[in-house]
Image (cartoon, helix red, strand yellow):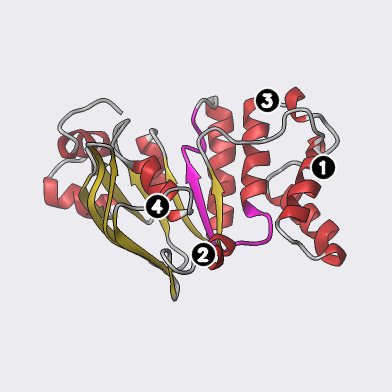
Amino acid sequence: MIKIENLTKYYGDLKAVDSVSFEIQKGEILGLLGPNGAGKTTIYRILTGYLSPTSGSIKVKDFNIQNNLIEIKKLIGYLPEAAPIYQDMLVFDYLNYVADIRGVDKEKKLAHLRELADLCSLNEVMHFSINELSKGYRQRVGIAHALMGDPEILVLDEPTAGLDPNQIVETRDIIRRIGKEKTIVFSTHILSEAEATCDRVVIIDRGKKVADDTVENLRKSLKLESFEKIFLALTKGKGH
C-alpha cells in the first residue's frame, strides 16, 4: 500500500529524517513512535505532500509522490497534531464546507455526513459551534474532516494528545472502528495505546529507524516485558 524508501529530509544543516525505509500493508494499523524531535511529523508532512523530501521516495499504491502528488492526496486523509478547524463554525456547517472542498457528490453528501457523525460520535453536537466543544469533541471533528471523501489511508499525528483518559478511550475506539476498513498510520506518546491498537510499530530516534516489528516480537528479541522499557532502550532513554 505504502512504500517509503531511503527517505531523507534536511532543514538547512539539520538532518531531520535519515534514510528511513519501511512499508505499510493495506488494512494495517501502524504506529510511528519516537521521542519529541525524532522526525515523525516530518515524515507525515512528506507523506501527505506538505513537504518535499531532500532525497528518497514514497510510493502509495502505484503512485510516486514526486510525479503523482495530487493522486496520492486523494487517497489520504490527514489530521495534524493541532487540528486545523474553524472554531467559529457549527460542526455541521464546517463538515459540509469540507465536503464541498473535497468534491463529495452533492447527492451523496448528506448521507456521507450522517455516516461520519455516527462513526465519530458527533450526532449530539452537529449543531453546536466548534468553539463550544471540549477538546475531545474537537478532535473527533478533526477525524471526521480527515475521513471526508472516504480516503483509503488515514494519517493521524498524535490524535489523543491533551485528551483526558475517557476521551482517549473514546478516540481509541474510533480508530479501531476505522481500522476495520482503512489503512491507518498514527503516532502517540501513550505507549499502552500503541500496544493495544497497532498491528505493528516503527520506532524513530534522531531521524533514524531503530525498530520495525510487532510489540510481541520486540519483547522476545529484547527480552523485555514492558513496552515502555523497550521504547526507552531503543531510543537511548530519551523522554517521550
The first of marks 4 and 2 along the sequence is 4
Q: Nearer the viewer, residue 178 or 92?
A: 92
Q: Residue at x 12, y 45 (%)?
A: 223
Return the x and y of residue 96 as percentages of the image width and height: 80, 49
Amino acid type of the residue tagged 2 in the rendering: Ile
* Structural distance between the alpha carbons of marks 3 and 1: 16 Å
The first of marks 2 and 1 along the sequence is 2
Magenta span contains residue 149 = yes
Amino acid type of the residue tagged 3 in the rendering: Ser
Crowdedness of circle 2 by 10 Å Cα count: few (<14), some, many (20+)? many
Q: Residue at x 59, y 36 (%)?
A: 83
Nearest to the eye among marks 3 and 4: give it: 4
* Structural distance between the alpha carbons of marks 2 and 3: 32 Å
Q: Which mark is residue 37?
A: none
- Tell me whether circle 4 and circle 1 mark residues in contact (CB < 8 Å): no
* Structural distance between the alpha carbons of marks 4 and 1: 34 Å
Q: What residue would you read off at disc 1?
A: 92
Give the magenta-colored segment's residue range. Answer: 147-161
The answer to whether 125 is drawn above or below residue 30 in the figure is: above
Q: Nearer the viewer, residue 173 or 207?
A: 207
Q: What residue would you read off at disc 3?
A: 134
Q: Which mark is residue 72?
A: 2
